[in-house]
């Protein structure tokens, strides 16, 4: 048996096959372009969201920096318990010294009044018994 297919038939078959392959590749190119468009849109949306996140984080960073500086200022002027204890002890000592000085003045005044006879010894004893620091 002889192969009776002519060159013309083979040429037509190749042309037909080539046309079909071109159609398939064109179809694949269209699908590929569509996939690229979808990926590009997705990428654009993701970039926009990240820009929004970056802007919000920049605001947070600025607020944290401000908060950090405020906490540092507060720490610099904040009074500690030991500092307060020392200051209160100093104040107590000053008040005690002032009260003793006042008592000495009162005692001196009462003694002088008793010497001049303006005040009896019994009244003087009663007045001196009322002092915060008894003698």
Image (cartoon, rainbow, N blue to C red):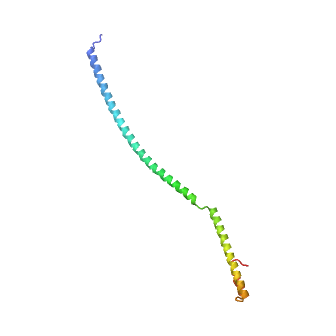
* 59 over 18 or under it: above or below: below
Residue at image position (37%, 38%) is: 40
The quarter holding residue 100 reads bottom right
The quarter holding residue 27 reads top left
Residue 32 picture location, percent across and down: 35, 33
Residue at image position (63%, 62%) is: 83
Closest to the observer, 133 or 50: 133
Tell me if 85 is positioned left or right of 135 in this view.
left
Residue at image position (30%, 25%) is: 20
Tell me if 26 is positioned left or right of 59 in this view.
left
Residue 48 picture location, percent across and down: 39, 44
Residue at image position (52%, 54%) is: 69
Closest to the observer, 36 or 2: 36
Closest to the observer, 56 or 102: 102
Residue 130 picture location, percent across and down: 69, 81
Number of numbered discs = 0
Question: Which quarter of the rendering shows the C terminus?
Answer: bottom right
- Is residue 131 visible to us here? no
* 65 over 126 or under it: above or below: above
Question: Which quarter of the rendering shows the N terminus?
Answer: top left
Q: Residue furthest left?
A: 8
Q: Residue furthest top?
A: 1
């Amino acid at each position: 048996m002889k192969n009776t297919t002519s060159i013309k038939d083979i040429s037509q078959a190749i042309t037909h096959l080539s046309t079909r392959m071109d159609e398939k590749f064109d179809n694949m190119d269209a699908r590929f372009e569509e996939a690229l468009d979808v990926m590009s849109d997705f990428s654009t949306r993701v970039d926009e969201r990240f820009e929004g996140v970056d802007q919000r984080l920049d605001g947070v960073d600025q607020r944290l920096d401000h908060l950090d500086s405020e906490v540092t200022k507060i720490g610099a002027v904040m009074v500690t318990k030991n500092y307060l204890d020392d200051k209160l002890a100093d104040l107590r000592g000053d008040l005690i010294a002032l009260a003793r000085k006042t008592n000495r003045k009162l005692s001196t005044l009462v003694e002088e009044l008793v010497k001049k006879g303006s005040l009896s010894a019994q009244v003087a004893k009663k007045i001196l018994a009322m002092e915060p620091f008894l003698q």
